[in-house]
Image (cartoon, rainbow, N blue to C red):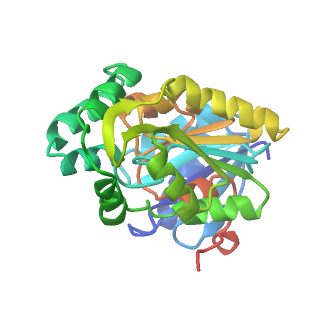
């Protein structure tokens, strides 16, 4: 069939009930689908596909969402064509990792509240990203590299499913890139921890073993993320439809909207509203399930 709708529950949350799947199938028929296939379970009690014809993915999504919007399940509808992606471009902070690194650094500098407020406003798209980064970096002046190491060692936490996402896509021939508005000090380490092919981020300027409060120009802003997606698409000789971008903040919107499938992951409202797909409940393995991977095909870290 031409289209597929995927229902996903959080592995740590409630199971995906049969009656919920039945409601989704009925909603597709009710809205005008000419054919709706039997549920195909990608992960028992957790994820299933429902293939359908006769209506667009957008219409199918809205049909199901009106019945399930208060249920703790994610809903993604898309064409079957190009479902498995050959390029992943991922944001880092609050996406691949569960923290905002600059906020944790600010905590060590005794300025967490001020910096976190600016971060939050920037991620909601309320202030210019480059300006906000300069302001926040200036508040870190004098912080030693030992405290950067401490922030990484003591505060950094990977998002559930991050390693599985990257390992599985790479095992199936995809190229994976970590593209962040944060700092190379962290992205290079997270790249190695998770297994990304490459990373791209801003660079903090040091004098000796202390931060100067400045960042190397040009600032890698939302446009830089978009340009990275476009460049990697060309370099890997793939179609736009074969690309997947994921992020949570306003600086991710351009790349999310330009990708073959752009995913807002536990994202700010502005981001979720502009994405083709949104994951509000599941972990990062949801990005594998929406590509049609089954639980048995997911590569687990050793």
Q: In this view, does 159 lie above or below 199?
A: below
Q: Is residue 72 above or below residue 260?
A: below
Residue 281: percent from left, percent from top = 41, 54
Most distant residue in the right direction: 237
Query: In the image, 226: left or right of 65?
Result: right
Quadrant hosting residue 130:
top left
* Label total for image: 0
253 or 192: nearer the viewer: 192
Residue located 24% across and 41% down the image: 142
221 or 233: nearer the viewer: 221
Residue 151: percent from left, percent from top = 31, 57
Residue 165: percent from left, percent from top = 60, 60
Residue located 78% across and 43% down the image: 82
Query: In the image, 6: left or right of 126?
Result: right
Answer yes or no: is residue 100 visible.
no
Most distant residue in the front direction: 208
133 or 258: nearer the viewer: 133
Q: Quadrant of the C terminus?
A: bottom right
Quadrant hosting residue 163:
bottom right
Query: In the image, 82: left or right of 107?
Result: right
Q: Is residue 83 above or below residue 154?
A: above
Residue located 48% across and 53% down the image: 96
Residue 234: percent from left, percent from top = 80, 33
240 or 29: nearer the viewer: 240
Q: Is residue 186 above or below residue 269?
A: below
Answer yes or no: is residue 245 visible.
yes
């Amino acid at each position: 069939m031409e289209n597929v709708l995927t229902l996903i529950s959080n592995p740590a949350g409630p199971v995906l009930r049969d009656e919920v799947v039945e409601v989704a199938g009925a909603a597709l028929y009710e809205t005008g689908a000419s054919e709706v296939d039997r549920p195909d379970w990608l992960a028992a009690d957790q994820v299933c596909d429902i293939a359908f014809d006769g209506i667009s993915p957008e219409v199918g999504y809205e049909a199901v969402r009106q019945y399930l919007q208060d249920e703790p399940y994610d809903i993604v509808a898309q064409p079957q064509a190009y479902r498995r992606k050959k390029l992943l471009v991922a944001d880092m902070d609050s996406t691949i990792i569960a923290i905002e690194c600059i906020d944790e650094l600010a905590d060590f500098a005794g300025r967490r509240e001020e910096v976190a407020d600016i971060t939050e406003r920037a991620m909601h798209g309320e202030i210019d990203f480059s300006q906000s980064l300069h302001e926040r970096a200036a508040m870190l002046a004098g912080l030693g590299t030992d405290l950067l190491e401490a922030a990484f060692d003591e505060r950094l936490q990977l998002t559930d499913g991050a390693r599985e996402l990257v390992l599985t896509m790479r095992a199936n021939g995809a190229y994976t890139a970590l593209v962040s508005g944060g700092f190379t000090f962290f992205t290079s380490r997270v790249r190695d921890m998770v297994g990304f092919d490459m990373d791209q981020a801003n660079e903090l300027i040091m004098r000796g073993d202390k931060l100067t409060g400045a960042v190397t120009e040009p600032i890698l802003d939302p446009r830089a993320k978009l340009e990275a997606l476009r460049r990697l698409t060309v370099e890997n000789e793939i179609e736009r439809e074969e690309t997947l971008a994921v992020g949570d903040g306003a600086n991710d919107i351009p790349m999310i909207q330009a990708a073959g499938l752009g995913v807002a992951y536990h994202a700010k409202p502005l981001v979720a509203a502009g994405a083709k797909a949104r994951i509000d409940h599941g972990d990062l393995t949801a990005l594998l399930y929406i590509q049609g991977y089954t639980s048995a095909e997911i590569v687990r870290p050793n």
